[in-house]
Amino acid sequence: MTKYISTPSRTKEILEKYGIHAKKGFGQNFLVDPIIVEKCAQAAHCEGAVIEIGPGIGSLTEQLARYSKKVVAYEIDETLPPILADTLSDYDNVEIILQDFLQADVSKKVKELKEQYGQVTVCANLPYYITSPVLFKIFDIGNDIPYITVMMQKEVGNRFVAKPNDSEYGALSVEGQYLYDVKKLFTVPGRSFNPSPKVDSVIIQFARKENCALDVNLSAFFAFVRACFKQRRKTIYNNVKEYLKDAEKTKKALDATGIDPGVRAQELTVEELKKLFEATL
Ligand code: SAM
């Protein structure tokens, strides 16, 4: 029986066979830890259709193909689809789309997949240089994606799960946690990749909140949140005043919400920041 792609020896064999050198510019670090890869796929709620960003040589794609009805994987590197056609030839439920994920019409694809397979989730070992833009693109798709299970750099993952008063708590934490229950599933050491990055990674899962109030203009709320954290050492009063360019309005909003003008944004909960945003409207 052929070994899984994610075993170090099979990955090495594939890289040698095709003369592949990981491209730093595309954030290529191939996963060579079959246990982590399988655990990631098992945790991803991928029993319907699953979207992957950056299949690489197919290590995670293979496990997703085993656990789901359909895998749609977006890959930017034009040298990889012919290789994936070989490495994933045993699976007939994988579609590779050669396209920059950030340019793709993903909403349209999600609608089609949902109609056909009932549920669509996302699972990926993200290219780290575009972790936030990829995630925000998926966040924008909304309720049609109930689970996003992604590997990212540990430092960024810690920011997504941080709570008020944690040193990593910031705009990323608030924006992610407003829409999702966010949890850290596993830590993945650098040695689980080829080539090994200097930093550790984590797998983070975003589970869409069912009762998330979407009565706010999300992009305006997120712009407000970023402004609140813009100068972390400044008080909430000063950051909001700078954002609103209006001292009186800022005082009124803080008064109406009972938030102490002297606190810093990192002391405020997601709910408090939302109330404050609404009071500024
Ligand atoms: N999934 C593979 C694995 O776990 O071994 C590879 C993960 S590697 C960290 C990131 C992958 O994303 C690479 O295959 C890279 O070429 C691809 N990639 C980088 N930027 C991309 C983009 N904008 N759209 C789609 N794929 C991208």
Image: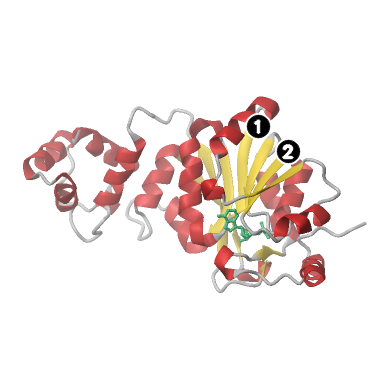
Query: Which residue is rendered at x = 63% and y = 66% of the image?
Result: 29
Q: Residue furthest right?
A: 1
Quadrant in which the C terminus appears:
top left
Residue 198 in the figure: left or right of residue 94 = left
What distance separates the C-alpha of mark 1 from that of mark 2? 9 Å
Q: Nearer the viewer, residue 76 or 152?
A: 76
For mark 1, what is the residue? 113
Callout 1 secondary element: helix
Instruction: Classify mark 2: residues with Cα within 10 Å, few (<14), some (14-19) or many (20+).
Output: many
Three-letter residue code for mark 1: Leu
Asked if marks 1 and 2 touch (Cβ < 8 Å), the reply is yes
- Where residue 5 appears, as percent x and y from the top left, is 79, 59
Res 62 visible: yes
- Where residue 74 appears, as percent x and y from the top left, is 63, 49
For mark 2, what is the residue? 70
Query: Which residue is rendered at x = 86% and y = 60% of the image?
Result: 3
- Where residue 262 appears, as percent x and y from the top left, is 15, 52
Query: Which residue is rendered at x = 23% and y = 38% of the image?
Result: 276
Three-letter residue code for mark 2: Lys
Specify the quadrant of the image occupied by residue 76: bottom right
* Number of numbered markers: 2
Q: Nearer the viewer, residue 184 or 71?
A: 71
Res 163 visible: no
Q: Residue furthest left?
A: 248
Instruction: Classify mark 1: residues with Cα within 10 Å, few (<14), some (14-19) or many (20+).
Output: many
Residue 66 in the figure: left or right of residue 232 = right
- Where residue 197 appears, as percent x and y from the top left, is 59, 71
Q: Nearer the N terminus, badge 1 or badge 2?
A: 2
Q: Quadrant of ligand 1?
A: bottom right
Quadrant in which the N terminus appears:
bottom right
Callout 2 secondary element: strand
